[in-house]
Amino acid sequence: MNRIEIQYFAVLRERTRTGRETVETAAATAAELFDELAARHDFGLPRAMLRVAVNDEFADWSQPLASGDRVVFIPPVAGG
Amino acid sequence: MRAFSFSSAPLDPGRYRAAIEDPAAGGYASFEGWVRDHNEGRTVQRLEYEAFETLAIEEGGRIVAEAVAKFGVARAACVHRLGSLAVGDLAVWVGVSSAHRGEAFAACRYIIDEVKHRVPIWKKEHYTDGDSGWVNCERCAAVAQGHDHGHDHGHGHGHATDDLASHAHLHLSGARQDYSRQIALPEVGRAGQAKLAAASVLVVGAGGLGVPVLQYLVAAGLGRIGIVDGDVVEPSNLHRQPLYGIADVGRPKAAVAAERLRALNPDVRIETHATRATGGNIDELVKHYDLVVECTDNFRAKFLVSDAVVRVLKPAVFASVHQYEGQVQVYRPLPHWPCLRCLWPEAPRDGMVGNCAEGGVLGPVPATLGAMQAMAVLKRLLGLDAGEAPALVTVDLLSLETRRLIARRNPDCNHDDPGTAAANAPEGPVLELEFGTLAEAFESGLELVDIRESWERLHDPPGLQVPTHLPLSALVSGQLEFPTEGRYLIVCAHGVRSLSVTEQLREHGLNQVYSLKGGLAALRS
């Protein structure tokens, strides 16, 4: 099990009603982690439309996760 | 001795003369400029010279090399004083040795005229009545008089704050723009202010983000600003767009913004495009500016702008807000910089992820992000963002957390190759590319080709090694041939020869050939 620090941005923060959370997870990749969280939260957006950053760097959804990783889910934002 | 140098100590013509002696020379001509006791009817006691030395030495050296090449003289040099001088002191010395006197006089005259016209040197006169003032640089005066110099010298044109007095911006109050608080920054200075005055920026969207962007860029004294906005002022805009007032409701935003911004700073030329950005007009709009700031509130426009700046190779600053958060992304037309589509391959449809109308927003949120965009623009124009990696910066104004998420170019993105995109652009292909430094040009991934003649390279070697040298004379005579495959950036002194070579090569089907805009003269040191 990996201990992952998660942060949500913009519309995801609204949907999850939390800016950040820390989870113990068996998810091996960013995609698996997202799918696991999607079962709990109503993200309302498909993964394909979002981006993930691991340790402050944009990453592929296939990026393997390690304990202590900081994962950020970012939706596109249009307001101005 | 160096072709062009500065001296803080009194000038020593005897020593300089000895340094340009040449056995092949049959004569020597020199010019000395002295401090005189009057200027425009006022009695001058002493004066001070100040220069932007890096630029000035580079430009001065170029002028001397031009004179040697143009008139075929043996040797030439120029020394300019800096610091405090009294009446009668020697301010500038020019010396030329040559086989014949005619060329010596002509080269000497050329050097002093060009130095006065092109080298960024400022002169502060102290008058007997205790008053003092910076004197117009001759270049500004020449520009004001429509002096056509025949070629563009690219950089170092010092429209310093005091020089702007000559451009007749005396307002009713008698006050004039004063950029001293930004010029005081060592990284800005007079040369930086001159860069801002020479810059043009297109702001797409004059709403919550666009308002602070416009206000700060206009206040900073940019040369020209374009506003694209097809909307009218609505009462619901005012809480986050305080450039407009309740009396403006129903009027076109672009027109109201232009009115307010002209009142803020008449130095800046404001151009309005009271239209919505569309696929049909965006390239044409973007083409005429150095940089684009994307401030709209919808994905359609954001991607439209992103595609356009990739096609026409312009830097852009994007921002978006959602409730208490925002994102900023800078795009530069370099091979490793991601465009908006690189980051968001699934371009979202509007209405799917919320905008200000749907999500709600507090005024200071877009104001903060807009101010960050304005800052990014100033950093780019002043060259303060060197070494900055491509990233998406996120800001949360509730927690006051910011994050810099490193972003990379997506190799699967349609816009991973500005060259290909440019060649495929329907609006007429891009032939010229602009770079701040030779190092940036190297980074572009294009192979640099110097088409100057050998003697030009001797007198003005490129700052970095440009290994490929195909002199234009050899290309024209057919001695050498331009390679038919590969991606090339052609460079010459001022970008005129390289553009015509590029045009000819394009006609022969070489679509990956570009000309360095403004030539080597347009690059920073």
Image (cartoon, rainbow, N blue to C red):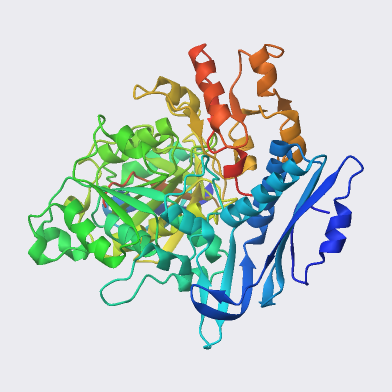
**Residue appearing at x 10%, y 66% in the figure:** B246
Specify the quadrant that holds the N terminus of chain B: bottom right
Q: With respect to residue B147, does B314 lie above or below?
A: above
Residue B417 visible (yes or no): no
Image quarter for residue B33?
bottom right
Q: Residue furthest bottom?
A: B129
Image quarter for residue B100?
top right
- Nearest the camera: B449 or B320? B449
**Residue B427 place in picture, x, y as percent:** 34, 25
Q: With respect to residue B65, does B451 lie above or below?
A: above
Lateral position of residue B385 relative to residue A76, left or right: right
**Residue appearing at x 75%, y 45% in the figure:** B104
**Residue appearing at x 54%, y 31% in the figure:** B496
Q: With respect to residue B132, does A19 lie above or below?
A: above
Residue B60 visible (yes or no): yes
Lateral position of residue B344 relative to residue B90, left or right: left
